[in-house]
Amino acid sequence: MSSHSPLLEVYDEQLRGRAAFGTVPGVRIELEDIVVRAIGLHLQGMVSATDLKRLGPSGWDCLVGRQIEVYSALKQPFEWKTWSHDHPQEFLSRLESFGFVRGETETVMIARVAEVDRSVTPPAGVHLRTATSAADFARLGTLLTEVFGEDMREQAEAYRAMVEAFPNSVSVLAAEVGDEWVSSARAEFVEGTDFCTLWGGSTLPAWRSRGIYRALVSRRAQLAANRGLTFLEVDALPTSRPILERLGFVAVTTTTPFLWSPPPAQIWPEG
């Protein structure tokens, strides 16, 4: 990964801090010392920090305790987003000692828009288009619920709110067969940066390994090119990484979420 340090540098400069939290209506970003904190996200808060090595172990406990204090007052769980290239392993251990639960590590992958094949088409019978209507997002909720095995209609509504609030910054794409959605994906054109970030890529099991995800990446690369953006970025799961590598993406670092939830005694009743 170190051989691609220029890409990592531009990622750190442009997609860390405020931009790390995406485009969500109603979110307040708070800057406090080396921490960037998101308040008002749909299901949980988020925190990221830079330059932890400068702060040193003596300041880590105070830093972590402060974030727990903030989200305890909000009665909300939160995710601490970490990166392997600048979050010391000792700090990750400190998070776990505070009760944070380590999530699945993803690979941060970046490609230059100009180097990605933007002509990839979906398989026969599959049509790609942009979600626009309430009915589209209802279909998205049905798709996500089937893919993840739990009710995801509320998440689909959150995506609809994003598109309505930021129509020039967020696009949700559908891969459909007739009137059935078989896959979806999201693109965010991050204001003030040269990046389009790619999210989602949720496909029904029966439609996987047919080139739909690849076609959705290609279509989003074209959308980024239309806006004059330079880079595409993905936090990739192991299943997506080989496909992205074949499309020209390179791995620059990894990111791991750590989730803190209020202990049972701090779960407050509604009202």
Image (cartoon, rainbow, N blue to C red):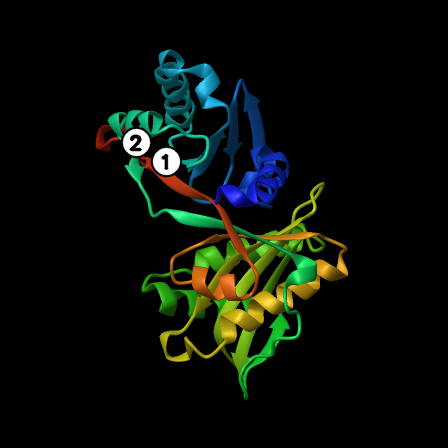
Residue located beneath label 1 in the image: 77
Q: Position of residue 110 (x, y in %)?
A: 57, 52
Q: Quadrant of the C terminus?
A: top left
Residue at 38% across, 28% down: 88
Residue furthest left in the image: 264
Counting from the top left corner in percent of width and height, residue 234 is at 52, 53
What kind of element bears circle 1?
Answer: loop
- Position of residue 231 measured from the top left corner of the image (x, y, whole percent): 65, 52
Residue at (33, 61) in percent of width and height: 150
In whole angstroms, how far apart are the C-alphas of marks 2 and 1? 6 Å
Badge number at residue 66: none
- Vertically, is 98 above or below 81? above
* Residue at the spot 41% in from the left edge and 75% down from the top edge: 208
What's the mark number on residue 262? 2
**Decide: marks 2, 1 in contact (CB < 8 A)?**
yes
| Amino acid type of the residue tagged 2 in the rendering | Pro
Residue 131 seen in the current view: no
* Along the line of sight, the residue nearer the viewer: 135 or 123: 123
